[in-house]
Image (tube, rainbow, N blue to C red):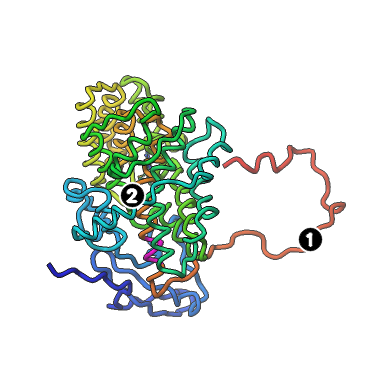
Amino acid sequence: MKRKKLPKLESEIIDTVSLRRNNTQEEWQLDVRKASIGPDSIDIRRLYGDSKMFTWDPGFTSTASCTSAITYIDGGAGQLLYRGYPIEQLAEHSDYMETCYLLLYGNLPQPEEKEQFVDEITNHTLIHGQLETFYKGFMRGAHPMAIMVGVVGALSAFYHDSTDINDPEQRKLAAHRMIAKMPTIAAYAYQYANGMAFPPPKNKFSYAENLLQMLFSVQSEDYVMNPKIVKAIDRFLILHADHEQNASTSTVRLAASSGANPFACVASGIASLWGPAHGGANEAVLKMLAQIGNKKNIAKYVAKAKDKNDPFRLMGFGHRVYKNFDPRATVMRDSAYEILEELGIKDPRMELAMELEQIALNDDYFKEKNLYPNVDFYSGIILSAIGLPTNMFTPMFAIGRTVGWLAHWKEMFSDPDFKIGRPRQIYVGEPARDYIQMNDRGHTNRPLRFNKFWQR
Ligand code: ACO
């Protein structure tokens, strides 16, 4: 079979649009650039130079920040493609190592390529002995995501031979090292919290098996593999491997755009992922289910979620891009049922989750706003069923997403339009004013202003 070359990151100009400022009658022509699938984009790069105006798009709801050939999402159709392959097919037929190869290198590997790739990753799973002592600096009760941000950021202090971003070999080494070490780093954060010794990675195991044995084996006993759990975790990692320009990936790209070292950039991605509106949602879903507690309370919480004056949201519902269904959620839901059945768990939270799902799916508010369960709604159920505490859910997501961050990090360097990321703003603050000496500022009997400042 002839192998397809990676597509160039340039997009063809296929049209122009006219932009007219009505009160001055000025007009500008802007190029339209073609996407291979999905919406074309208006090229506004010259707009500021020509018109002295910025565009305004908080949250980047209509802004393409780069060209990319890695992942495609059609939110309306509920479609997710990694390098063109549907996520459902990858979840069924592929494995995480193959998916990593695909995302990084653009094509499914041939047998020799897969073998060598797995070999390279397997040979980097150990972490430096001195890095292990680093864990002792953290409080036992520290959130594992806090530990991960710290330890991954610290990798740049340990692996000096892979921080030169201008050297392709060092870039490859850094990427392979991070994919390899992430399960070890996350598992040790968990073992550290439990006060247990750190089980070494074992080369005889697959990526998912190794992760499970490092999470659950103790010195006195080996972890007994259950092939269904191994498969579910491998699939979990595939489903989380990439999601185009989401908050954490954009964070990695922005951090990397300044030329920062790759370990620091991935640490910034982990920090962004931690937020409850992003990867932290899987943990938040289980906390929410605990808060709801009982089926009879669902109506009350659905009403709270709909109340504009109440900050409560149904965690695991809604998505910036998917406005029909999240294809990852469909696979994850089946996987969740499979695992609960395999382990014979009758988890009342699962029943609560299913009831909540049905009520929300039939509620006008959720229907009108296209709020469907996302991948995080079900992933927590699986992770909880295999015995992980809620604070380990987002670290598991981070392990899977590392390859996506790295694929985008690598792609950025191949982009002919690569520049340091530097958004602009609409300034609405004070115009220039003169400094006032302290004695001329007067006194106030009102409560001090800075105490109120931090309220929303
Ligand atoms: N519960 C109740 N109402 C919601 C929810 C929700 N989960 N999500 C969105 N809405 C409402 C908003 O209040 C808003 O209403 P309005 O139009 O009346 O103001 C409307 O739907 C649009 O919401 P936005 O926040 O503007 O949508 P956005 O695209 O910015 O946010 C997000 C998407 C962050 C995922 C949001 O749906 C949310 O907070 N969901 C819960 C957290 C979650 O599950 N995050 C995981 C995302 S998947 C992932 O990262 C892997």
Q: Is residue 195 above or below residue 150?
A: above
Q: Residue at x 29, y 56 (%)?
A: 117
Picture quadrant where residue 296 is located: top left
Q: Ligand 1 shows up in which quadrant of the image? A: top left
Helix or strand or loop: what does disc 2 sit on? Answer: helix
Q: Residue at x 45, y 75 (%)?
A: 47
Picture quadrant where residue 73 is located: bottom left
Q: CA distance from mark 1 to mark 2?
A: 61 Å
**Residue in the foreground of this view, choosing between 455 and 240:** 240
Q: Which residues are magenta?
A: 408-412
Label 1 CB, ligand 1: below 8 Å?
Answer: no
Label number found at residue 122 = 2
Q: Position of residue 326 (x, y in %)?
A: 26, 46
Q: Is residue 225 visible?
A: yes
Helix or strand or loop: what does disc 1 sit on? Answer: loop
Q: Position of residue 321 (x, y in %)?
A: 32, 52
Q: Is residue 84 visible?
A: no
Quarter the C terminus occupies: top right
Mark 2 crowd level (few <14, some 14–19, many ≥20, 10 Å Cα): many
Q: Could you tell me what secondary structure mostly forms the magenta stretch? A: helix
Q: Position of residue 107 (x, y in %)?
A: 23, 62
**Residue in the foreground of this view, choosing between 83 and 367:** 83
Q: Which residue is mark 1?
A: 435
Question: What type is the residue that disc 2 sits on?
Answer: Thr
Count of marks, rendered view = 2
Q: Name the outermost residue toward the left.
A: 1
User: Is residue 409 highlighted in magenta?
Assistant: yes
